[in-house]
Image: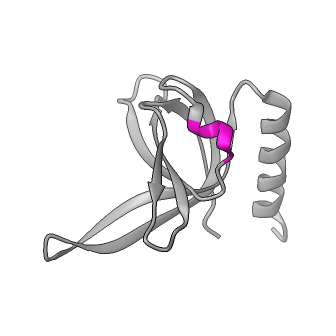
Amino acid sequence: MNTTFLRGRLSSPPRTLELPSGDAALALELTIRDGEAPAESVPVTWFAASKAAAGWEAGQELIVIGRVRRRFFRAGGRTASRTEVLAATVIAAERKADARRRLDRAVAEVTAGL
């Protein structure tokens, strides 16, 4: 099972990506700080983004539930890759009850059958 949970802050405003298929995705860059460890930057792609999410600002604290993926593509005549989190759910951290409910549901899915 490939499930990840992130909590961090937007390092820049979300960007809307227009794909060749006509679909749109929201690109987020999340900065994660874990105690005294150096900050980590995690790219997140969200295909089911709400319209309100496009208005989030840098510094907004978010919780992301999704999966890690590595995709390959051609760039400049060479094969390149990118590792990112493909979000299923993104919640503003201040929405504590909603965030807790969704996290509990995701943890139950992960632990089912153990």
In the picture, residue 20 is in which quadrant? bottom left
Residue 41 locus on image (x, y percent): 39, 39
The N terminus - image quarter: bottom right
Secondary structure mostly taken by the magenta-highlighted segment of the chain: helix
Stretch of the chain drawn in magenta: 50-54
Horizontally, is 73 left or right of 63 in the view? left
Residue 28 locus on image (x, y percent): 48, 43
In the picture, residue 64 is in which quadrant? top right
Pick out the residue farthest to the front: 22
Q: In this figure, what is the number of numbered marks?
A: 0
Residue ID at (75%, 62%): 110
Residue 106 locus on image (x, y percent): 77, 55
Does residue 36 lie above or below 2 as drawn? Answer: above
The C terminus - image quarter: bottom right
Residue 17 locus on image (x, y percent): 45, 55
Any magenta on residue 51? yes
Residue ID at (44%, 57%): 84
Any magenta on residue 24? no
Horizontally, is 5 left or right of 31 in the view? right
